[in-house]
Amino acid sequence: MSRQRFFPTKLIATILLLIASGFPAFAQQRVALVIGNSGYKEAPPLPNPVNDATAVAALLESAGFQVVLRRDVSINDMRRALREFSDATRNADVAVVYFGGHGIEIDGENYLLPIDAVLERDIDVDDETVSLDRILRVVEPAKRLRLVILDACRENPFSRTMKRTMAKRSIGRGLAKVEPTTSDTLIAFAAKAGSTASDGDGRNSPFVTALLKHLAEPGLDLRIAFGRVRDDVMLKTDNEQEPFVYGSLGGSIISLMPAKADDSAMGPRPEPSQQANLEITFWNTIKDDKNPRLFEAYLKRYPNGAFADIARITLEGLKTAALTPPVARNDDSTLISDPGLVGEVRDRLYELNFDPGPLEGPATDAARQAIREFEQQSNLRQTGTATMGLLRRLRETGGLKPWGAIVYDKAKGKWGMAWGEETRKAAVARARASCGDASACPIEISFFGTECGVFAHSGSNWAITARDDIGKAKEAALTDCRKRGKSCEIIVSVCADGAERFTAAK
């Protein structure tokens, strides 16, 4: 069962490119400089940066940016491009710089390498490279947002040959951590400080592949977008590469690709064709599952849908099967003591939207209560104990999907949200990543199928609710919020299947 909670604190929302409320999507002056260096002369060439830069430039152009694209540039060309770009940023609202290629760190400072860098000595960086500090100074005049994206966290190609002028001077691995001194500035690394990024074996690097996928989604909240970029890259690289974002933004709603305009005050609604795509996507994710709750969720959202008849037939069959006593096995009553199997029981209960308490460590009363609730729902004798028979039934039942989540951090006043995830764990993790990191926003509400979550706020109260209908969820959230505050408003509304995604400007 979904739960609701109240949270008195200040909301802080951070995201990517500012879309001013009430103005046309491209009313802002948006400029971008994109550089991709592959053909290094004195360092190992890189196969993807030119491809990456070309793709990023196309993405930014489609988002309404005036883009300058430079490929395989020398130090003189790189400096010239920055000088010319500095003129463009003076009147810009949003300025973006993307660099793909070799980058190095010396004594805590980061430098980007043109293709003709030689770097016989460490002090040559002043003459043969461009410092990250210089790029930050170039984008500083932009009025609303400054964004620097670096896919340059590779091994220093000159670390073995470069002579040091001072014995204590350090030459680091990857790039060094950086904290922007100017507000509303973000610096996105392909790999967090002190680690390296993969160039990948495809046409684009893993980092850029993820950027192109998630930053291109219309209206997508930046925290979610970069959280998804991080998740995709870590999955692609077996957790060896973790992208990281440094800096902070204010509280305005920002996205790279503008959301489609809508006359409703409650945010954009899917068009008919989008609704059909949502229905097909949802159906394809559940059609082979054995959990009747998935088909119940489909029929609630699409009672006259294209697959409604099939869903009803499948649902009746699953309900009939659920009433049939399972075939008894000799080990059904065997208590589970193996920690791995105990963990699996709790994980499966969690993915069925029960609350078994901590997913690690000794079983708690919450876990035993969750087992009893599952047994009651499955017409089993209620024991509250983890047995092999229980685990077998959990495995046969399967999980629920798709999942959405809204998370909140009362102390820091941050929130995050996610939708369309295959598991509850993934939804909560992505929502927390959009909130800041995996340990941020400990308060969570998660929902599955076609359920929707809503976050409402007033000056004196907060409420988060989840219901099987977006209208009911909004009504419940506002009602709960208004118990101690009259001027409540919807801050976030999102459905697990993506049918509604709304965030209010501050």
Image (cartoon, helix red, strand yellow):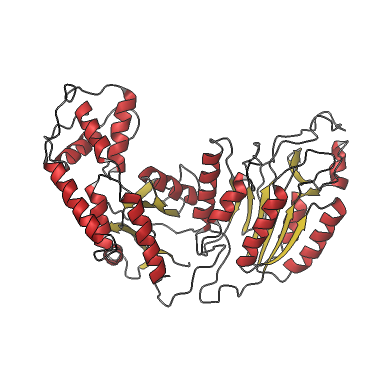
Q: Quadrant of residue 90?
A: bottom right
Give how far across and how far down residue 119 sits, in percent: 86, 39
Whether residue 284 is visible here, answered yes or no, is: yes
Task: Please say if 65 is above or below 313.
Answer: below
Residue in view at x 41 percent, y 71 percent: 271
Give how far across and how far down residue 282 sits, in percent: 35, 56
Whether residue 496 is visible here, answered yes or no, is: no
| In this rendering, position of residue 471 left or right of residue 168 | left
| In this rendering, position of residue 429 left or right of residue 244 | left
Q: Quadrant of residue 23?
A: bottom right
Q: Quadrant of residue 157?
A: top right
How many marks the image carries: the answer is: 0
Residue in view at x 48 percent, y 47 percent: 433
Residue in front for this viewpoint, 66 or 463? 66
Give how far across and how far down residue 83 sits, in percent: 82, 62
| In this rendering, position of residue 26 left or right of residue 488 | right
Give how far across and how far down residue 222 sits, in percent: 53, 57
Residue in front for this viewpoint, 250 or 447? 447
